[in-house]
Amino acid sequence: MRILIYGAGVIGSLYAALFAEAGYDTSIYARGKRLEALRNNGLLLWEDIVGKGKILPAFPGAGGSINEDGILDAALTPRMIQPTTFAEISGNSSERTKQFSKILRHAHIPYQKVMDMHMWQLCHLAMVVPIADAYYEANCLERAGKEWKKIRLWL
């Protein structure tokens, strides 16, 4: 079977790599700078670059922006809303997760270790994307969470 992935962003590239590793004849449709990078370097995965087993999947508990003048306007989100979340791919506790916990605690960054980072991310996206989109489209930011019509657009 031949598979065409339409779009070479993060998700398309990941699926293309997984399908190719599973033995499928896989192609990616890309354009612009991404097409040029793929032509010059092929599909590079961080794990291929840094080495197998060296990546600790994590999701930041922070947000913000950088304005046109290069000024950072960002903050950590409250622990109750979104701590920095991480786990070993295997779900096991390790020296790395213990060390990372220590680093985050010392830096006063709220965090949580989870067993299944992939499942956590899926659940997180299902909850956060509608709320975040309502926030960004809200006319009155203080009422963003109450604008259910906007949230429903994303459900």
Image (cartoon, helix red, strand yellow):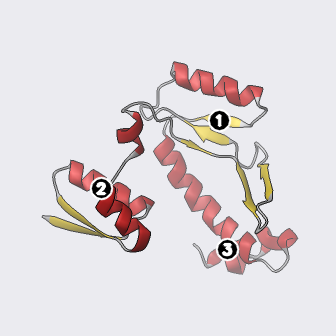
Are dots 1 and 2 in contact, CB under 8 Å? no
Residue under the point 82% across and 80% down: 139
Residue under the point 76% across and 61% down: 70
x and y, in percent, of residue 16 in the image = 29, 58
On screen, residue 44 above or below 134: above
Mark nearer the N terminus (1 vs 3): 1
Query: Which residue has dot 1 on it?
Result: 112
Are dots 3 and 2 in contact, CB under 8 Å? no
Q: Nearer the viewer, mark 1 or mark 3?
A: 1
Residue under the point 77% across and 66% down: 67
The kind of residue tagged 2 is: Gly
Query: Which residue has dot 2 on it?
Result: 42
Q: CA distance from mark 1 to mark 2?
A: 35 Å
Q: Of helix, strand and loop, which one carries label 3?
A: helix
Q: Of helix, strand and loop, which one carries label 2?
A: loop
Q: Of helix, strand and loop, which one carries label 1?
A: strand
Dot 3, how many residues are within 10 Å of its Cα: few (below 14), some (14-19), or many (20+)? many
The kind of residue tagged 3 is: Ile
Q: Is residue 106 left or right of residue 140?
A: left
x and y, in percent, of residue 58 in the image = 56, 41
